[in-house]
């Protein structure tokens, strides 16, 4: 049995599996949020970085000055992913892309078919460049979905804050009690920011604004701006919160409708192709009979 084609197929299949894994939707990691939401005021020693993170940081220090090499710092922080692991994954996929064409040409060489050396080299460079960008696209898509999930949670949070303000709760009390209701990762992020504000003796809206800037959450920045004026006019703040909640719900529904329409349009081409294939299959016996007569 010739094992060369088997090894070549296994390598290509492994590359395709890694590519599919990168493009799959993943939930944001909760390690950062859980660490931030610890009730203890004592400093918790940071865990030692993993071996992959160490190697990835070593690569990042040497590749960060290369044109075209960038790390989405805010997206990775939102997802709870390390920059080193991200760079290591990019480099591993690029190396796999370089090797795939070379390994794929081995069966041809064994069979006696000679190929110019620049064919697998050019194909390897092209595949490596594409695979090098795959983690960026995957992280960007995951971060976009995470921000959408955060916006959905913030819609409920705004309603809770408005109800607390209508019940004559203070600004800080309304923000903290509303955040304690939820248990998802967006609420954990907000709880951590408000807890830090209380410990550092800063206004809660300032902590929320810093959190919005750290993770690119413009909706949360709007909440901070609204709550900044809550000390003077509680009724106006209540109306502003309700109006922002209604506008946010409209934005979310519009985005979901647009996403559903895009998904429906993507299904049009496969459906039309399937219909054409069915018609060809039905007409094939008649055409063969006409040609053989």
Image: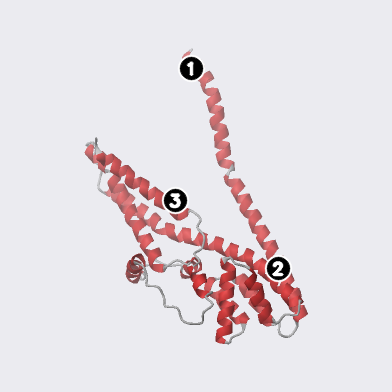
Secondary structure beneath dot 1 equals helix
Q: How many neighbours does mark 3 have within 10 angstroms: few (below 14), some (14-19), or many (20 or more)?
A: few
Residue at left 34%, top 72%? 61
Q: Is residue 179 above or below residue 261?
A: below
| Image point (40%, 73%), residue name | 47
The answer to which of marks 1 and 2 sits earlier in the sequence is: 2
Residue shown at 22%/39% (left/top)? 110
Q: CA distance from mark 1 to mark 3?
A: 44 Å
Q: Which x, y percent locates residue 215?
A: 53, 71
Quadrant of the snapshot with the N terminus: top left
User: In the drawing, does residue 66 fall left or right of residue 197?
Assistant: left
Measured in 3D between alpha carbons, the distance from the residue under mark 3 to the one under mark 2, in whole angstroms, is: 37 Å
Give coordinates of residue 80: x percent, y percent: 47, 67
Badge 1: residue crowd in 10 Å (few <14, some 14–19, many ≥20): few
**Residue on which disc 1 sits:** 291
**Marks 1 and 3 in Cβ contact (< 8 Å):** no
Name the mark nearer the viewer: 1 or 2. 2
Crowd rating for badge 2 (residues with CA inside 10 Å; few <14, some 14–19, many 20+): many
Q: Is residue 120 left or right of residue 19?
A: left
**Residue on which the image places disc 2:** 245
From the viewer's perspective, is 268 left or right of 292?
A: right
Q: Mark 3 highlights which residue? A: 20
């Amino acid at each position: 049995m010739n094992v060369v084609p088997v090894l070549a197929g296994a390598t290509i299949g492994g590359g395709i599996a890694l590519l599919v894994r990168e493009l799959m939707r993943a939930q944001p990691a909760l390690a950062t949020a859980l660490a931030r939401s610890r009730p203890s005021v004592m400093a918790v020693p940071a865990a030692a970085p993993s071996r992959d993170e160490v190697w990835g940081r070593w690569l990042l220090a040497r590749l960060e000055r290369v044109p075209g090499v960038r790390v989405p710092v805010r997206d990775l922080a939102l997802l709870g992913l390390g920059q080193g692991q991200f760079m290591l994954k990019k480099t591993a996929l690029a190396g796999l892309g370089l090797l795939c064409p070379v390994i794929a040409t081995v069966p041809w060489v064994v069979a006696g078919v000679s190929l110019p050396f620049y064919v697998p080299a050019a194909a390897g460079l092209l595949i490596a460049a594409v695979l090098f960008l795959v983690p960026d696209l995957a992280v960007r898509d995951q971060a976009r979905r995470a921000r959408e999930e955060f916006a959905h949670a913030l819609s409920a949070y705004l309603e809770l804050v408005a109800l607390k303000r209508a019940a004559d709760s203070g600004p800080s009390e309304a923000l903290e009690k509303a955040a304690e209701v939820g248990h998802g990762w967006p609420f954990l992020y907000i709880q951590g920011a408000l807890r830090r504000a209380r410990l550092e003796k800063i206004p809660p809206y300032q902590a929320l604004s810093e959190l919005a800037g750290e993770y690119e959450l413009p909706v949360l920045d709007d909440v901070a701006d609204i709550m900044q004026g809550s000390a003077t006019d509680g009724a106006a703040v209540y109306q502003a919160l309700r109006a922002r909640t209604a506008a946010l719900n409209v934005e979310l529904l519009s985005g979901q409708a647009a996403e559903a329409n895009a998904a429906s349009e993507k299904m049009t081409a496969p459906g039309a192709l399937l219909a054409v294939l069915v018609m060809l299959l039905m007409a094939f016996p008649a055409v063969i009979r006409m040609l053989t007569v």
